[in-house]
Structures are given as C-alpha cells and as structure tokens.
Image (spheres, rainbow, N blue to C red):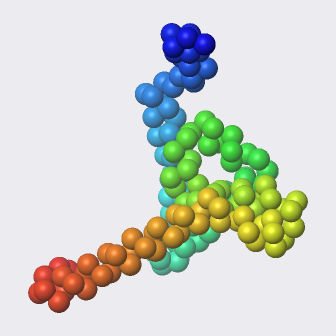
Amino acid sequence: MQPKEYEQYVKKVTPTHNTPLNMCKAFLTGGIICTIGQWFTNIFLNNGLEKDAAGAWTLLILIGSAIILTGLNIFPKIVTFGGAGALVPITGFANSVVAPAIEYKKEGHIFGIGCKIFTIAGPVILYGIFASWIAGILYWILNLAGVYWA
C-alpha cells in the first residue's frame, strides 16, 4: 500500500467527532445528573436532615442508581450519549468499579470479581491517594517554613 493510499484509508476509517455537539451532550447529561442530585439534597434538607447528612444520602442514591443502571446495561448507553458528562460525576466512578465486576463475574468470585473489580478505578484511587499524600507533605513543609493559610 502506498503512503497516499494509506492516508486515504486512515481518513476513511477514522471516526469524525463533532466537538461542539459532544460538549453540548456532556453539558446536558452532567447537568441532568447534578440537577437530580440537587433535587435529592433539597428533599433531604426540607425533611430536617443536616447539610452533611443530606449530602451523604444524595451520594448514596446517585452511586446506587449508577450501579443499578450499569447492571441493567443502561448506564453505558448514557455514557455513549453524554460522554464526560456522565463519567465525571460520582456516577462515573461507581460505573468504573461495577462494570469490570459484572464483566468478569463468569470467572468466579476470587479470580473474576476480586481480581478485576478495580482495574479501571484502581489507578484513580492510587493516584488520588498519592496526590493527597504529596499535598500533605507540601502543607507540612510550608507550615514548618512559617507559611500559614486558613
């Protein structure tokens, strides 16, 4: 295959993306998820829960909903439509933990679910903990140097 033929082939098989449309879909999807979360928070606050408790219950509902929708194979369709709008909120993290567990459950509880459940979420957890550790060390060093902030 000649270079020009290869270039034409690559252009033919490379998917094209409409970035403004994808951004609008992500904004719409993420906005709907956040609006649902705010709706639950308002319900809990109006029924006498404190702000922290209302937030915790809202998170539990959003995470539980994402897990159930992932198990019913609905959440992947939401992600296909909304992209980062569905993956960035806490619902996306719940999906990233549950999806490998569902995919590998046929291999058993130990070698399937147990070994594969954190294949996607594991690096996020690892680097999140590492980044917070680095931030804590920097905070400690700056406090030793006399730099304080509230």
Image position of 10 (left or right of 77):
left
Left of 104 or right of it: where is 132? left
In-front residue for pair 20/101: 101
Above or below — where is 108 with respect to 25? below
Please provide percent x and percent y for residue 132: 39, 75
Looking at the image, the residue that sits furthest to the front is 2
Residue 110: x percent and y percent?
82, 73
Question: Is 6 positioned to the left or the right of 136 in the image?
Answer: right
Q: Is residue 125 visible?
A: yes
* Residue 48 position in % (x across, y down): 53, 77
Q: Quadrant of residue 131?
A: bottom left
Q: Nearer the viewer, residue 7 or 125?
A: 7
Q: Identify the residue at horizontal 25%, vertical 86% (top origin).
A: 140
- Give the residue drawn at x 11%, y 87%: 146
On the image, which quarter does residue 104 sit in? bottom right
Check the picture and name the quadrant holding the N terminus.
top right
Q: Residue furthest left?
A: 146
Q: Residue at x 86, y 62 (%)?
A: 107
Tell which of 48 and 21 is nearer to you.
21
72 up-or-down from 121: above or below: above
User: Going 62% across and 59% down the picture, which residue do you hit?
Assistant: 120
Query: In the image, is residue 28 above or below residue 9?
Result: below
Say if residue 40 shows up in the picture.
Answer: no
